[in-house]
Amino acid sequence: MRNFKKPDVLVSKCLEHGRCRYDGQMISSDFVKSTKKYFNYVPVCPEVEIGLSIPRNSLKIVFENEKFEFVQNITNNNYTSKITQFSSDFLDSIENIDGAVLKHKSPSCGIKNVKVYTVK
């Protein structure tokens, strides 16, 4: 029988790979759990990678001055440039990623159904 290389799949670190969510939790994912033997998962948490603590005040995406910004709840600190720079550097550093499993509704990982706040 031939052995094939496992696909390399980017995964939000909080999905079965680490307690890195804003509240210090890890999220159970039946899909990620059941596919670990088939994929080489490459876990990443942009918020931790830019130096935010665990636990931490959560981030939100706001639309202000005609652009999207990553702002931390309560402190109103803006992390847009750090998240953007990390994401660009990280994506440039990885090769041959075959897919991605990203946390739904995450401001730094999610790509669908992320709540965007409008600043008036």
Image (cartoon, rainbow, N blue to C red):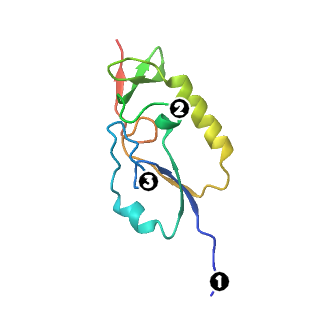
Drawn side of residue 3 relative to residue 116, left or right? right
Q: In which quarter of the image is residue 118?
A: top left
Residue under label 3: 17
Q: Which kind of residue does numbered mark 2 sit on?
A: Ile
Pick the residue in front: 8 or 21. 21
Q: Which kind of residue does numbered mark 1 sit on?
A: Arg
Kindly check if marks 3 and 2 are in contact, taking CB atoms under 8 A apart as contact.
no
Residue under label 1: 2
| Direction top: furthest residue | 120
Residue under label 2: 50
Q: Which kind of residue does numbered mark 3 sit on?
A: His
Circle 2 — which element?
loop
Q: Which of marks 2 and 1 is nearer the N terminus?
A: 1
Drawn side of residue 74 relative to residue 47, left or right? left
Q: Residue at x 33, y 45 (%)?
A: 25
Q: In which quarter of the image is residue 61?
A: top left
Q: Residue at x 36, y 36 (%)?
A: 22
Crowding around mark 2 (Cα neighbors within 10 Å: few <14, some 14 to 19, many 20+) is some
The quarter in which the C terminus is drawn is top left
Drawn side of residue 94 relative to residue 24, left or right? right
Crowding around mark 1 (Cα neighbors within 10 Å: few <14, some 14 to 19, many 20+) is few
Measured as percent of width and height from the top left, residue 12 is found at 46, 48
Crowding around mark 3 (Cα neighbors within 10 Å: few <14, some 14 to 19, many 20+) is some
Measured as percent of width and height from the top left, residue 19 is found at 38, 46
Measured as percent of width and height from the top left, residue 32 is found at 41, 61
Location of residue 116 with respect to 30 vertically, above or below: above
The quarter in which the N terminus is drawn is bottom right
- Gap between marks 3 and 1 measured at Cα: 29 Å
